[in-house]
Image (cartoon, rainbow, N blue to C red):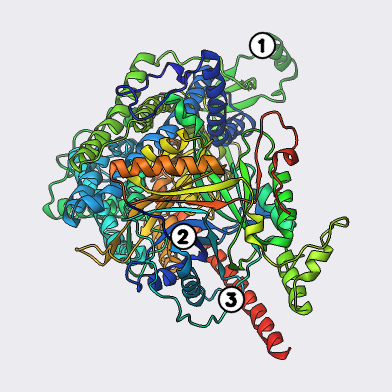
Amino acid sequence: MSADTPHPESGPPTRTPERLKLSTRDTVAVLWPYLKRHFGAQVQSIWFIVAYMIAFQVLILRLPIVYAVTISLGLFTVALGLMFFMEGLRLGLMPLGEIIGSVLPRAAGLPVILVFAFLLGVGATFAEPAIAVLKAAGSGLDPNDAPLLYSLLNQYAGQLVASVGVGVGLAVLLGVLRFFYAWPLKYLAVPAVGALLAISVVYSQVPELNDVLGLAWDCGAVTTGPVTVPLVLALGIGVCRVVSSGSGGGGHSGFGIVTLASLFPILAVLGLAGIHYVRGDYVNVAAATPVTEQTETAATTKPKRASDPVSVDDYAAFLETGRVPAGFNLVVTGGHTELVDGRILVSEPTLYIEHPYKRPFSVVDDKGWNHDLSMAQELRKAAMDAVRAIIPLCLFLYVVLRLLGQKLGADSDVGVGILFSVFGMGLFGLGIALGLTPLGSQLGSNVPLTFAEIVPWGGEFSEQALLGASAGKLLAVVFAFFLGYGATLAEPALNALGSTVERITAGAFRKKLLMQSVAFGVGCGISAGVVKMAFGIPLIKLLVPAYALVLVLTVRAPNHFVNFSWDSAGVTTGPITVPLVLAMGLGIGANVPGVSDGFGILALASVGPILTVLIVGLYTQKREQQEEDDARDDSAVAAAKEAMS
Amino acid sequence: MFRNEKSHAVITAVLPDASARRVLGEIEQHDTATALTWNARGTLLREHWLSRFMPMIEPGKTILQMIVPDDAADDVMDITIRTARLHQQANGAVFSLPSVHSHVGSEFHAWPVKANDDARAPRSVHLRDSLDLICAIVGSDYSERVARAAVDAGAHGPVVYFSDGRGLRDRIGWLRITKDHQQEVQMVLVDRAESDNVFDAMARAGKFHLPGRGLMYAMPVGHGMVNLPSRVSRSAATADMQQIVRAIDHLAGHAQWRDRSHVNPGAAPTSVEPSVAHRATSDRVALTAVVKDEHLPRMTDLILDGGAGGLNQVNARFVGADDLSPESAARIHHEYVVLRSIVARDVAEYICQVVHDTAEDLGVRDMCLLAHPVGRLAKYVPGAVDYRAAAERKSA
């Protein structure tokens, strides 16, 4: 498949003395195991979430999969795209970041490095703007309910992106500076989180500002995308390859930038909201634009219930017996109702007897292919997104590299890698649009079926709730856990972080351990988010205790765990998790009175992994301490023996 | 340009991260002294089914490598042992590898040659001089199997670091992206009496006679001290084999019993006493080149063209005293690459000559080339079926 990928051979290889000529057969023999291995690895990372979603929809909700053919094609494309993208990261983006990181400290002074770091952070934000995601989360928003939030997302969207960009830029700057002075991440993260919590508590007292909290905290989670994270991570590792500070107490160096990059944007957005609140130039109720028609119509039309026509035979049977046959419903409408002698008297009603519709169970819906979908358009969009996210940043890095007087060697794979990552990200985006989003959004909007009567996604008639309100909500919470767990395992940025951690620690900290603990944490976080939505708990009441616990654990945990766990919080919410979680959040929000937006789930989803990884860290530290004590006892015994003999 | 009048040894220390920092700090006190460092890990075997799902975090280690003239070797070892408290349990290991050839560039930051060594400080610790170093280069799929075999055969848990392979796959154009990265190098230090046992067990477990499985070699160690733990996450076994062996050593007061227990009925009892020169009669040597990052492609090509079958590449950083950054308290290091290849002795001599000449032509003075004797080798030999045929037994 990649045999037709163009490869950049810039001129003949000058240094390599002889290049082996391979026949087509040999080429295939070399490529086949490679493709098989990497495609297999991606299938392994996405199979759980896909199988889980299909099983939940078909077996528990008992709804058919709509657009099954489109979705299958999309999922295949996702795996293919991920394969190329991950290889592109490994061969192109990450080496490029590492080379620059390791060249900069020698070739340039500290001020130049800091300017570069700031520009990289800002550039990364503009390359992967998360504003579309945030707009989606606020799509059901009513400007009358949350005027400040509404105008931040619409009128001031540009300022929002800019403030997030400045936040990320400052974060990368501080993150790099940290390596030079060996500040432990604790010293930066703890005050930052403390400030954030304090501001959040203050904001929660003001209704307009309270609405913004969810958006602000989500900004932190969303800004760090699949291109930004590996690039910034590689930069940090590159810097730490050559820089070490005297005390060396910073723990496993190279990590930590991603953390700051997910904290500072929150601060920036909170600041922006504060400024607009003080100036009072947001949409106020009087000047509010008319509410979008969409929400109105959705609110007024009540979904109809389907019914089977009553057959002539049934009608005959009814005439004969005069009784409502089993399985039929008696509906009373109209008439005049009053309470007489302790009984309800309905005079002159209209009575219907109808046969409730039993939808035949099927795994796959009749609608196999989504005809509304324009392939060409999706393809163009995905390709544009991929090019925009990768090419300008890489060009910037390449120009910086050349300015520093460095060249990429002729035998460097960076060119191939960048091509791979653009190609892979394009395919990945297309696959998400074709497969993962339709699957996720139909399941996400069907999940409230567990506790509410709704019209299933792509269906025409409403369905009965599966369970009662409490039990159903509980089922939705459990569902959310595994959705978060599975989606996180498939997240490319987390995969990249895991491999990097494994490589840097020479395998001491396994990728699998990191992935599993992060996925578990995200699952818990998303469950908490669903609890928040389903039971209408204010975000602040969940966020403050969670982060307070994180702060306590952070202070106690060993330094390198602090780095890993905070970094993994930044990478968890990527292109796979976000659409799935948002679809579910909006679906649940629409069926719970008083909840209008899907904000806050992502913020909770990024606290979860910090907690779990820190707990794993504290646990192993305790064990190591124990074993060290044992070893010390052993040597004491040995010394005693020696003294005796 | 190359100083090869003095023979150099490589002193390698495997230390936990914290004491590695202490040792580096101590080393920097010596004026031109430097060390190459890279990250490694210890091994923790997973026995319990639960811990297979949730892998344990293995202890992080740092490897320090110092290239020193033979007569300074003892001093460096002494500094390391004292600073890192290596004589205590589970604190690490240090050992020296003598070299048969050494070409050290004039700008390479090797340790200075000592002017006079008559005033030798009395050694407070006793070094073992009957050690063998076994290195196995394996893909990460098979690494745990090999590590388990080593521990079961009585060695400590292998010290592992990652390396890149260089060789054939670099010559196939853009298809070189198919190269499997991150090969693990597993390093075990064992007593010479047990060396063959451990070597065989590891070679069998890793199936090194099959193509594409990597290779394995043993090298005689000059002298050294091993206090590496091998932790097994098994509550039933509170002591591992190495600890038990050590305890019996301690009770018996000598290590002779191990030699007798070695199943080798026909042969005359071999001495536990070392005979490095005797063992080093193999016609293979381990060629080690330490080059700067920017000279890497050139040198790789030279060594591969000179007849080396493949190269094993480890990125290291050079910690020296003169790297202080002007703006901050941070140190800015140079990056070096350690290349290693197992080649026949005459090939090694040829490569040394070629590299030497080319380096002089290009004016590359900041590199060094060392060759260490190799005792045994296990690798895939086309046509051979069993690893035993491929392994070269040159012992006694």
Q: Tell me the number on the disc at residue A604.
A: none
Residue designated by label 1? A311
Name the residue type under label 2: His
Q: Position of residue B239 (x, y in %)?
A: 73, 68
- Secondary structure under badge 2? strand
Disc 3 to disc 1: CB gap under 8 Å: no
- Protein chain holding label 3: B
Give the chain letter at badge 1.
A
Disc 1 crowd rating (10 Å Cα; few below 14, some 14-19, many 20+) is: few
Q: Helix, strand or loop at disc 1?
A: loop
Q: Is residue A483 visible?
A: no
Which of label 3 and label 2 is nearer to you?
Answer: 2
Label 3, label 2: how many angstroms apart (C-alpha)? 25 Å
Q: Amino acid at mark 1?
A: Ser
What's the residue at 35%, 62% (across, down)?
A185
The residue at which mark 2 appears reads as B8
For label 2, the crowd category at 10 Å Cα-Cα, with few meaning under 14, some 14 to 19 and many 20 or more, is many
Q: Quadrant of residue A641?
A: bottom right
Q: Do tags 3 and 1 sit on the same chain?
A: no
**Sequence-first disc among 3 and 2:** 2
Residue A236, percent across and down? 33, 51
Question: Could you give the CA–CA distance between mark 1 and mark 2, rounded to whole angstroms?
Answer: 100 Å
Name the residue beneath numbered marker 3: B87
